[in-house]
Amino acid sequence: MSAAHVHLALNHIPVLGTLFGAALLAYGLWRRQEAVQRASLGLLVVAGIAVGAVYWTGEPAEEIVEGLAGVSHDAIEVHEEWGWYAFLLSIATGIAALVSLGLGRVRRQLVRRAVPFVLVLSLISTGVMLYTASLGGTISHPELRGQAANVESVEPHEENE
């Protein structure tokens, strides 16, 4: 399994973990269910940890694909830049979620103030993660870069009867 394959396989964990963690946290706050809030905070911590593996496999993945036909170097660079922002935001969200979980054992009042902050941070992180993932998809898919007109299509052969 190459670094590119590992990068592609792992990138779903922080993207979906942050997305579902934010949604679950919003639901937990709306319904005032502390167990749901704790579960979502735990999911955001896991996403914050997983983003490290995704970020650190990005450079080796770049080295594998950058010389391949149809791969856009410019798309790689933009994806890499936004990957850094997604990495930082996801780490910050994971740390804030971990602190909120730790506060829950000490002071409930602090948690009530910290959890909405984690929700806002996780929503921002989710947006940046989804944008970064979208940019990653354009690296080797010209149809996603708006270059579908440049991609040759193969017409099926018609049988002469």
Image: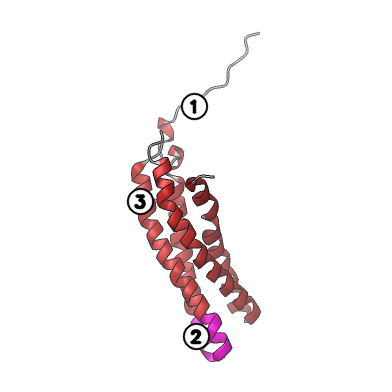
Dots 3, 2 in contact, CB < 8 A? no
Real-space CA distance between mark 3 and mark 2, rounded to the nearest whole angstrom: 36 Å
For marks 3 and 1 on the same chain, the one whose residue lies earlier in the sequence: 3
Image quadrant of residue 56?
bottom left
Disc 3 on helix, strand or loop? helix
Q: Nearer the viewer, residue 122 or 13?
A: 13
Residue at 55% x, 67% y: name it.
Answer: 46
Mark 2 nearby-residue class (10 Å; few <14, some 14–19, many ≥20): few
Real-space CA distance between mark 3 and mark 1, rounded to the nearest whole angstrom: 28 Å
Image depth: mark 3 or mark 2 in front: 3
Please give the residue where the numbered disc 2 appears in the rendered image.
113
Real-space CA distance between mark 2 and mark 1, rounded to the nearest whole angstrom: 56 Å
Q: Position of residue 151 (x, y in %)?
A: 44, 30
Disc 2 on helix, strand or loop? helix
Residue at 46% x, 66% y: name it.
Answer: 90
**Residue 117 seen:** yes
Q: Position of residue 112 (x, y in %)?
A: 53, 86
Please give the residue where the numbered disc 3 appears in the rendered image.
78
Magenta region: 100-115
Please give the residue where the numbered disc 1 appears in the rendered image.
153
The kind of residue tagged 1 is Ser
Dots 3, 1 in contact, CB < 8 A? no
The reply, left or right, for residue 81 in relation to residue 20 is left
Residue at 33% x, 45% y: name it.
Answer: 74
For marks 2 and 1 on the same chain, the one whose residue lies earlier in the sequence: 2
For marks 3 and 2 on the same chain, the one whose residue lies earlier in the sequence: 3
Image quadrant of residue 21?
bottom right
